[in-house]
Image: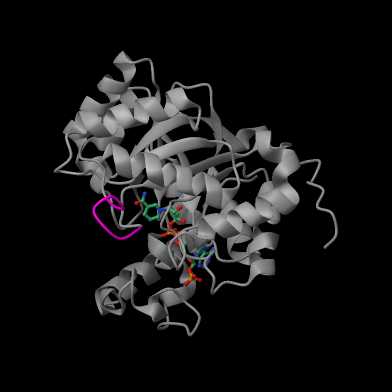
Amino acid sequence: MEKYIANEKRYADTDFMQRCGESGILLPKVSLGLWQNFGDAADFEENRALLHYAFDQGITHFDLANNYGPPPGCAEERFGHIISSSLAPYRDELFVSTKAGYEMWAGPYGNWGSRKSLMASLDQSLRRMQLDYVDLFYTHRYDPLTPLDETLQALVDIVRSGKALYVGISRWPLEATLYGIEYLRQRDVRCLCYQGRLNMLDQEVVESGILEAVRREGLGFVSFSPLAQGLLTDKYLHGIPEVSRMQRDASLRKSLLTPELIAQLTSLNLQAQKEGKTLAQMALRWVLDHEGVTSVIVGARNKAQLADSLGCAKG
Ligand code: NDP
């Protein structure tokens, strides 16, 4: 493989970066998530090309989790392989996040939010990614059975250990989130951001007050599934393509694609065309226009999809 040298102009568009809440961290308006398209089934060279392309475009933030794949763990492994073979010289330009909280290994400690589970999971993630530390470590979901203080103290101790520079909260309900932010603050640990789903088809984080509350608390907000897993693109307007997430009928169920939804998407697509945008670009712009949103984490499968999505933020 030819030695990778990053595009010299990758930071030329200074508007592409946005401050994450009231922190010292700037994040790109478009970040890349490695949930479903970096598994063993994906083409390695295509994955590598996508990461290089993303970085060349100024995307510094890559979002992972212990269980991303499939199979679980292999997205981190593949990411680690690519980092160590070509992106290692740029490690200090990268902002890498990972998470723990969903089922990862057998037995009572491979899931949820105990100290044991979070600490062991982060150690595993670091090994898979061949990194000394991650920039951001998230509790991936709210655990109703583990005392909140146990989960939160594990986050404090993870920061103190230097294995993560910042911590974040994903998918917690409002009240627990506010408790967590305060718990961490009292121990001089910054909760950098909240990661939640916000897109044109799902505005629950707005309706529940989470987006506004975390903004008031000085956190950033990063939105996952900003394209509703691909629904908010033109790909499902005329049925289910052979190569598509919905074809797998797992995280994106075929039963979702009702005539009503297709009519709604068709109308949004027409609106986007009138604005001279693709539906994906309009949908991402819509998320970014919310006060308090720092970044949309897109799950692009290839360079063409990412190039299209970047059109929402690049002039
Ligand atoms: P998206 O809403 O961006 O959906 C990604 C899918 O949309 C792609 O796989 C592709 O589908 C399709 N797509 C993307 N861009 C285009 C385009 N321009 N034109 C046509 N189709 C397009 O995001 P994800 O649902 O993948 O989530 C993004 C990231 O958010 C994840 O990788 C992960 O990092 C994070 N996440 C976090 C969660 C949490 O609990 N905290 C939960 C879920 C995600 P196809 O493959 O069919 O072509």
Q: Quadrant of residue 231?
A: bottom left
Q: Which residues are magenta?
A: 105-111
Q: Is residue 266 above or below residue 68?
A: below
Residue 293 image point, x, y percent:
41, 37
Q: Is residue 27 above or below residue 107?
A: above
Residue at 54% over, 52% down: 128
Colouring method of the image: one colour
- Residue 166 in view, yes or no: yes
Give the quarter of the figure containing the N terminus. Answer: bottom right
Residue at 55% over, 66% down: 301
Q: Residue furthest right?
A: 2
Give the quarter of the figure containing the C terminus. Answer: top right
Residue 149 image point, x, y percent:
21, 28
Side of 170 where 26 appears, left or right: right
- Residue 275 in view, yes or no: no
Q: Residue furthest front?
A: 107
Side of 270 where 152 appears, left or right: left
Residue at 63% over, 46% down: 314
Side of 255 where 271 appears, left or right: right
Residue 94 is one of the magenta-drawn residues: no
What main secondary structure does the magenta stretch of the protein show?
loop
Count the marks: 0
From the viewer's side, name the closer residue of 53 and 265.
Answer: 53
Residue 225 image point, x, y percent:
40, 56
Q: Quadrant of residue 232?
A: bottom left
Q: Quadrant of residue 259?
A: bottom left
Residue 260 image point, x, y percent:
25, 74
From the viewer's side, name the closer residue of 227 and 25.
Answer: 25
Residue at 47% over, 74% down: 235
Q: Tell me which image quadrant ligand 1 sits in.
A: bottom left
